[in-house]
Amino acid sequence: MSRNEAAEMKRDIDGGGMHFGFLLLISLRNLLRQKRRNLLLGMAMAIGMALLLIANAFSHGISDVMFNRILNYAAGHLSIGFSQRGNQGSAVFHDGDGILARIRGVMPADARVDEAIGVFCRVVGNGASDNVILIGMNVAGAVTEEEKASLRENFTMIDGDFGEITRPDLENPVILASDKARYLHVKRGDVLRARFQDIYGRNQAARLTVAGIFKPANIFMSAPVFADLPRLRGIVGYTSHDVGGLRLTLRNPKETAIPVADAIHAALSPPLAAAQGLVSRADPADPADPVKGAHSSQTPSGGRPAAVRTSVLGFQPDTASLLQLSKALGLPGADAPGPRSVLAGRILADSLNLKAGSRIAFTYAAKHDGSAQRAEFKVTGMIPPAAGLPGNLLLVNDKDFYGFFYAAWPEPVRAGAGAFLPDSSHPLWSLLDREWVLLDRTHTTEEMEAKYRNATKFKTRATLVDVLTMYESASMIVKLEYALNLITLSAVLILLFIIQVGVVNTLRMTIRERTREIGTMRAIGMQKGEVRAQFLLETFFLAIAACIAGVALAYLGMALLGRLTFQAVGNPLAMLLVSGHLNFKPTLLGGGLYVSLIIAIAVATAWFPSRRAANLAPSDALRHFG
């Protein structure tokens, strides 16, 4: 310290204490006095800062690839799956409009729901064949510029144009990855022959025209063959009101996937399945029956009505359910319904003169187009009159009930007078079929697998509905993201420890070399807190300068690393790349957090050496010879 500085410092102290601005000037001057040591420590901190930012950006880049690219195409952040007749391969729900209305009513406003259709098939190319998944792409649904840019990035076309997947003049146009095209020995314009099962389990064949070949953005894009969704729906057998599966894309899936799935699951609680319409005799009238025209909707004078309004409900035909049904209806054991039973209410039976063996026709209006539908049944028994049970009720076994119910979804039955529904308090209510069966929510892959094993034991013909998140359907991808974050966290802790050791050692050497200077400052009146503050300010400014340099170095490093091209075809590590390049996603929150953390760690680490320097006795410090 020069005489002028000491005199100026003494004047500040004599004037009532040292000005904070002068402390800042001294701290900055001391940083410049020891350029080499501070430069080395600052470089180490800057490199550490750069590595932290690069690791953080790489981790977020991997998360972006996995959650917004791989998961989005593979399973979605959240998915609603359907399976009919207990067959997981028959993915269809016949009231797509109704199920979508329920889902949209509870999902976040910024979420997006898309139909997801994937068909396993065997394709034959030119001298080679392979098992593939034929996936429908809703090209017309990509309406925003962000979605269009995502499609262009994920489907970098080598030959042809992505838009040709919708060409009406091509027979079932598809696009496929370059390595799949090489394996099948096909090029643009060639025809693939595919064999698959439609949604009704029937074996089908189709010709697929190769409309384009693309370079896959990641390994998961190499396996499927992509077709236009509306065209694929027609090939597989979906009608305009059917839906094959639903996939939700969320803005912040890590935080919202589970609560949104729980909300959707609650909204999909299945209602009672019922169809309301007219029932009439479908066989010649009994000779004792005064009604002569069985199919007439008129009521003959003095005779029975030709048609009676009724509600048709379904019941489970398994042994346990039939025993409960017989008990709920008060049927004797000899009259217990069998698997193919149709039970008619007493008013219905008396009105139409029905007996065991009578054939009846049920006509009703379809929900989606209002068309008249007809289903025929054979009566096997009668429902005894009871409180809470309407006499116009018709109970149909599960197989026959869902056979007509799903073939043409009936208009909803409005509760109230004339609905002919049993009271919800009646024991029969819990035994009746629902419009679908909602599987329980699960939270791990193991629970999901156990659920599906149990689902195969269901005797129902109802459509099974399942709500899944990425944590069940794609847990391996999520676990990989967790593992990468753990590696990043370990690197952060190691770098912070190195920085801490470097700060402590540097300050200890600095204090040792400046002991006499500390004694001089204390001798002319500088307080302990001001000495401590001086060293803390030096560390603070050094950390800020190092962080600024580290941020610049990190962005330069990411720019250079992002330009490197990796050939990782067939390598699982390719899923971490985007079009062969490393994907960095730096975030303002992550950068600010690491800058604050390094500055805080550096200043906190400097506290103890600074306190030791402040506690030096002036007489001992002045006698020190380093």
Image: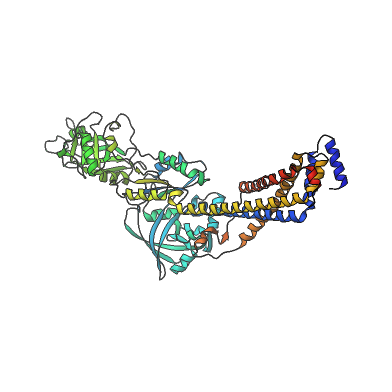
Left or right, 219 with respect to 422, comes to right
Q: Is residue 556 above or below residue 417?
A: below
Instruction: Indicate left or right for 353 with 86 as reference.
Output: left
Question: At 52% from the left edge and 43% from the top edge, which residue is drawn?
Answer: 110
Image coordinates of residue 339 in percent, x first then y, are 21, 45
The image quadrant that residue 295 belongs to is top left
* Residue 200 coordinates in the image, percent (x, y): 32, 53
Closer-to-camera residue (384/22) = 22
Residue 399 left/right relative to 531: left
Answer whether residue 25 is visible to the viewer in this image: no
Is 169 drawn above or below residue 504 in the view shown? below
- Residue 479 in sight in this render: yes
Specify whether 19 is left or right of 404.
Answer: right
Residue under the image location 70 percent in, 49 percent down: 543
Q: Position of residue 467 (x, y in %)?
A: 41, 45
Q: Position of residue 297 (x, y in %)?
A: 24, 36
Please state which of residues 127 and 612 is positioned toward the viewer in this rendering: 612
Task: Give above or below for 131 relative to 63.
Answer: below
- As drawn, the residue found furthest toward the bottom would be 127
